[in-house]
Amino acid sequence: FNTCFRTVEPLEYYRRFLKENCRPDGRELGEFRTTTVNIGSISTADGSALVKLGNTTVICGVKAEFAAPPTDAPDKGYVVPNVDLPPLCSSKFRSGPPGEEAQVASQFIADVIENSQIIQKEDLCISPGKLAWVLYCDLICLDYDGNILDACTFALLAALKNVQLPEVTINEETALAEVNLKKKNYLNIRTHPVATSFAVFDDTLLIVDPTGEEEHLATGTLTIVMDEEGKLCCLHKPGGSGLTGAKLQDCMSRAVTRHKEVKKLMDEVIKSMKPK
Amino acid sequence: MEVGMHTDSKSRAETGAESGPRGPGCSLRHFACEQNLLSRPDGSASFMQGVAEKSREQLIRNTCEAVVLGALHPRTSITVVLQVISDAGSLLACCLNAACMALVDAGVPMRALFCGVTCALDADGTLVLDPTAKQEKEARAVLTFALDSVERKLLMSTTKGLYSDAELQQCLAAAQTASQHVFRFYRESLQRRYSKS
């Protein structure tokens, strides 16, 4: 009977759980799913990370290439993110050009990189006006079960922390770049932006880390990206039911706690990888 | 910093409306609105305030979806086409205002009106409402909000740059006060239109 009810009246089914302040998968309204991160699994990439938020799985691979710096900013490099939601992660995506959700997610990640100044683009410059690094960050979703933005942000951060760039010197005589693969340096990651997403139910209730089904039933979503000093890089609320200032404050405090959780997890993983 | 920008007084039709000069306490630029300009679509409005990128479209679409009573019109598609005539800053807010006025002009049933307000925070933390393009570029953070007319709740928000939680609350409060002026302007503009016909 329960499964029938869930299929026929999903919203009512959910409302019964929400009345008891919990969700069908047993979580409380402010609880995140189990988060796991695996860093450095792709050996062909300069940096990589795999993040799992419950069932949602996102893998990020960073490749570094050379490019000429932009003419209006000759001392800056580029960071180019791209989020791919292939048909394999969910039946709601078709093969072909990127759909709206993938484009919006790519734009979101680009905004987070730009606003949070996670990497100083000047650090990516090798020779002003001539040569700079471009970091292609490819985020691929392997399993879509809601809350894709949080998983992507975390995967990007972990992958960038894993990136090692070889030292490059410009040979004076030949004017060619010489890459020293034996000497590699980690990137200077200046801030650690962490995303916390919420779904709004029935215009009043806010739940954290929505699954795919919850996102579908929700009347609105909200994503807050915060760095370690409590500064906000992004407040992404693409329409949906209205929120009062007070509700927004509650979300902020939850975002602060989440940032601590994620930072702790990432520090543990990086520490466990260090001895080489 | 005051920027006078109303230059199309000659082409304004009788049904158009204009807001008064900037009163004390209101730092929004002058705005004007015309309705029913185009004969073909069901409703149209132009909103002049002092991307067709996918994400901007998604923001506007989701805001409209939240207020339009779609259940009254099943199997219906409502297309909102926004054409930017000129961009002098606060583009997204202007698009939201135009979309709302056009939906009203078309007679689409809505549960509330909405308006867009942009705030810019410059390097020393001063808040500027409705920034010009130059102010936006030089600002440390630019926040755009869509607020509803019933309880001034936050319908949509998109931000650029870094800012603190306190600054966010300050901007939101300022935007809520400013939205009153915009809603009052909607009301006057509609009254003027229907009283003439």
Image: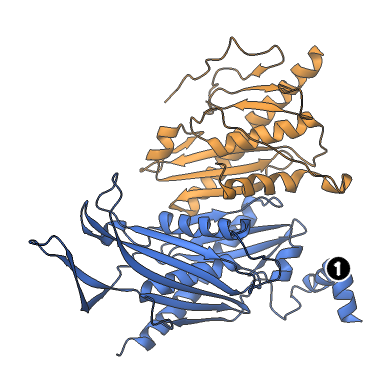
Chain colours: A blue, B orange
Residue A86 x, y percent position in the rendering: 60, 69
Q: Residue furthest top?
A: B10
Q: Residue furthest left?
A: A173
Q: Is residue A180 visible?
A: yes
Q: Residue furthest bottom?
A: A276
**Please, what is the three-letter code of the amino acid marked with disc 1?**
Glu
**Quarter-wise, where is residue A224 in the image?**
bottom right
Residue A222 x, y percent position in the rendering: 62, 58
Q: Is residue A257 visible?
A: no
Residue B167 x, y percent position in the rendering: 48, 48
Q: Residue at x 57, y 56 (%)?
A: A104
How many residues crowd around disc 1 within 10 Å: few (fewer than 14), some, or many (20 or more)? few
Q: Residue at x 28, y 45 (%)?
A: A71
Location of the N terminus of chain A (image quadrant): bottom right
Which secondary structure lies at badge 1?
helix
In the picture of the structure, the residue carrying the numbered disc 1 is: A12
**Quarter-wise, where is residue A121 in the image?**
bottom left
Above/below status of B102 relative to A273: above
Above/below status of A264 relative to A200: below
**Quarter-wise, where is residue B39 in the image?**
top right
| Chain letter, disc 1 residue | A
Q: How many marks?
A: 1
Residue A144 x, y percent position in the rendering: 64, 72
Q: Residue at x 65, y 47 (%)?
A: B154
